[in-house]
Image (cartoon, helix red, strand yellow):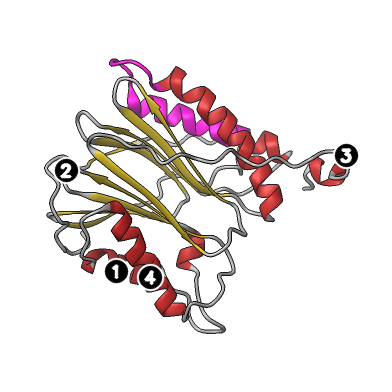
Amino acid sequence: MKLPFLNHTAQRELRKPAPSSIPKLDNLQVAMQYKGARMGGDFFDFIEAEPSRLIFVMMDIAGKRDEAMHIAAAVQDRFREAVPDLFTGADVNEAQAAADLNIVVNRTILEAAGGVRCAPAFLASFDEGVGTLTYVNSGHTSALVRDGEGTTELESNGVPLGLFSHAVTDAQLWVLQPGSTLLLASKGLIESKKGFQKEYGFKRLVNVVKEAQFSTAAELCAQVLGDVEKYTHNADAENDVTTMALMRTAAVRSAVAGGVR
């Protein structure tokens, strides 16, 4: 299916999303790092909602970068518009709000693309007051949570966004204990390789997160990207290679290595 705006690029300028500001919270460190020039459709954004929530999304929109960023700009507009309505207030049902926001983002992708456009996404709300993470993983690479008990995968529990207009995915709940860290990595990172060798792979990412020694979210991102560069001999990336890390910093302590469970 062709996208309507691709037939009129001379008359219509493709948009790009506004830069995303990394939030600074009292009890949560947030870090974003990526390798090399941006060439694909990786997109992320953050917005804070009262009284103490951080809502964020990370997604990989298929297609050429200009086309993908045009869709991302529409998603960003709708995301920033919908979050205050869905998440503000002490009595919000976060699971319902996250599921509803996922529907809003999904339909925005379909509308902006003028049809089907695969966009795996991880969308979540973190309640800074109690440490709960309410999330929907729509076909995205599993998030990894490392804490004193080990390293856990927050696996996909729904189909990628942008495929079905009536897709509904329930939100999941995880508690980030003080000192625990969540890492998200893009598909481009998992598929990194040099020449015809094997892809970097999710298993290697798990091992790096499991063994890494770090005390900040930014240090974990840097170690992951450093290992990717080592594996690929710093070859030019074929797609966006992106990492996002969140560390709950109340009573911060260096993360303790542990096994996947």
Which mark identifies residue 198?
Answer: none
Mark nearer the viewer, 3 or 1: 3
Mark nearer the viewer, 1 or 4: 4
Which mark identifies residue 177?
Answer: 2
Front residue of 253 and 195 = 253
Mark nearer the viewer, 2 or 4: 4
**Residue type, mark 4 in image:** Gly
Front residue of 67 and 104 = 67
Distance of mark 2 from mark 1, alpha carbons?
21 Å
Q: Position of residue 134 (x, y in %)?
A: 32, 35
- Which of the two labelled residues, at mark 4 and mark 3, occupies the earlier sequence position? 3
Classify mark 2: helix, strand or loop.
Answer: loop
Q: Position of residue 5 (x, y in %)?
A: 80, 41
- Which of the two labelled residues, at mark 3 and mark 1, occupies the earlier sequence position? 3
Distance of mark 4 from mark 3, alpha carbons?
42 Å
Residue 166 visible (yes or no)? no
Q: Position of residue 142 (x, y in %)?
A: 38, 55
**Residue type, mark 2 in image:** Gln
Could you tell me which residue is drawn at 33 percent across and 18 percent down?
92
Could you tell me which residue is drawn at 69 percent across and 36 percent down?
112
The 10 Å Cα crowd at callout 3, few under 14, some 14 to 19, many 20 or more, is few
Q: Is residue 199 left or right of residue 88?
A: right
Report which residue position mark 4 lands on. Answer: 226
Magenta residue span: 87-108
Distance of mark 2 from mark 3, alpha carbons?
52 Å
